[in-house]
Image (spheres, grey):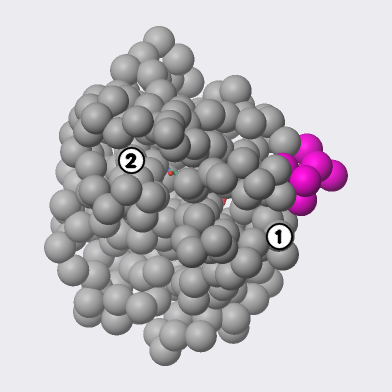
Amino acid sequence: MKKLFAVLGNPIGHSMSPVMINDLFSFYNIDAAYLPFQVKEVDLHDAVKGLKALGVSGFNVTVPHKSKIIPFLDGIDELAANIGAVNTVVYENGQLIGYNTDGPGFLKGLNAFLPKITDQKVLIIGAGGAARAIYLTLAKENPLVLNIANRTIEKAWELIKECPYSVFSSACSFEEASESLGEYDLVIQTTLIGMSPKINEQPFPLNKIRNQTVFCDIIYNPLETQFLQEARLNGASIQNGIDMFVYQGALAFEKWTGIFPDVERMRDNVLKQLGGRTC
Ligand code: NAP
C-alpha cells in the first residue's frame, strides 16, 4: 500500500518540501506520497490524531507549529526536547516520535566548509527559533567559544542559560559583535534581516572582517543576502541557507526510509524551484 507522508504548516503553499521529497520517492522507487496540509493552530491536535488514524508513516512540521505540536506527540528525542521544537515526526511502533533535524541539518551542511567546529570561535547572530536549534546543536560540538548577538540581548542570555551542554558563551549587542568580528572563525546569520522586505539590509557592517572567517546566512531567498555579499567581496568563504534546508530534509528522509538521499539531487531540485523567484 502507498505510504503517506505530509508537512503541516500555516501557510504551506510556499513549501518546497513536497516537490523535493516526492522526487526522492520516485528516484528511490518508494511507493509513497508527501502532501502539504495547511493547518490552523486550533485544528493542530485533530490533524495529528487524523494522520495517526490514517496510518501516516511520517511528517514534517513547519512554522508556526514546531513547538505547539509537542504535547500532541507520543514522545520526542533529547535534542528536540532541549530545542523545544520538532520539525520531523516518525511513526514508530504505533507511536508518533518527534525529532529536530534543523540544527543537525545545519551542522551537516556546514561540514563541507568546516569539517570540525571543535576549538573554533563561533558567533551566532539572532536568538529566534532557528538560532536556538543551531546553538544547541553546535554547543555539543565543543567549540572554543559560542557567542550570540541579538537585537534583544535578554533573549540571547535566556538561550545561553537554558543550554544543558557545557560551552563557553556570552551574549552581545550588534555593535559589540561588529567591533569583535575579527575574533571569530565562523559567523552564522539567523535573523530575518536580508529577507524580503529587508533585502537591502544586514544586521551590522562587516568592517572588521578577517578573510579566513567562514560566513553563513541561513536565508536562501535571496540566495546571496547583502550580509553574504559583503563577506564575499571582502574575501571570506560564504554559505547560504540552501544546505541547511536540503540537509534537514535529507535527515528527515533518512529517518523515514533508512536511506540517506542524494543531496546534490535535492539541491538542484530546490534551486530549480527557486528559479525566477529568488527575492
Ligand atoms: P524567529 O524565531 O522569528 O527569529 C527571528 C530573529 O530575527 C530574532 O533573533 C529577532 O530578534 C531577529 N530579528 C527580526 N527582525 C529584526 C530586525 N528588524 N532587526 C534585528 N533583528 C531582527 O525566526 P526563525 O524561525 O528563527 O527564522 C529566522 C530566519 O531563518 C528566517 O529567515 C528563516 O527563513 C530562516 N530559516 C532558514 C532555514 C533553512 O533551512 N535554511 C530553517 C529555518 C529558518 P529579536 O529576538 O530581537 O526579536
- Name the magenta segment's main secondary structure: helix
> Dot 1 lies on which element?
helix
Query: Which of the 4 image quadrants contains residue 210?
Result: bottom left
Give me the residue at 62% from left, 66% from top. Answer: 74
Q: Is residue 46 magenta?
A: yes
Q: Which residue is mark 2?
A: 246
Viewer-closest of 116 and 252: 252
Label 1 residue near ligand 1, CB within 8 Å: no
In the displayed orientation, state which residue is furthest to the front: 1
Viewer-closest of 102 and 31: 31
- Locate the N terminus and report the quarter of the image it occupies: top left
Q: Is residue 222 magenta?
A: no
Q: Is residue 260 left or right of residue 84?
A: left
The kind of residue tagged 2 is: Val
Magenta-highlighted residues: 40-47
Measuring from the top left, give residue 169's x and y in whole percent.
45, 80
The kind of residue tagged 1 is: Phe
- Say which mark, if any, is on residue 72: 1
Q: Is residue 8 visible?
A: yes
Q: Is residue 83 visible?
A: no
Sequence-wise, the earlier of marks 2 and 1 is 1
Above or below residue 157? Residue 193 is: above
Above or below residue 103? Residue 49 is: above
Measuring from the top left, give residue 26's x and y in whole percent.
28, 25
- Say which mark, if any, is on residue 9: none
In the displayed orientation, state which residue is furthest to the right: 42
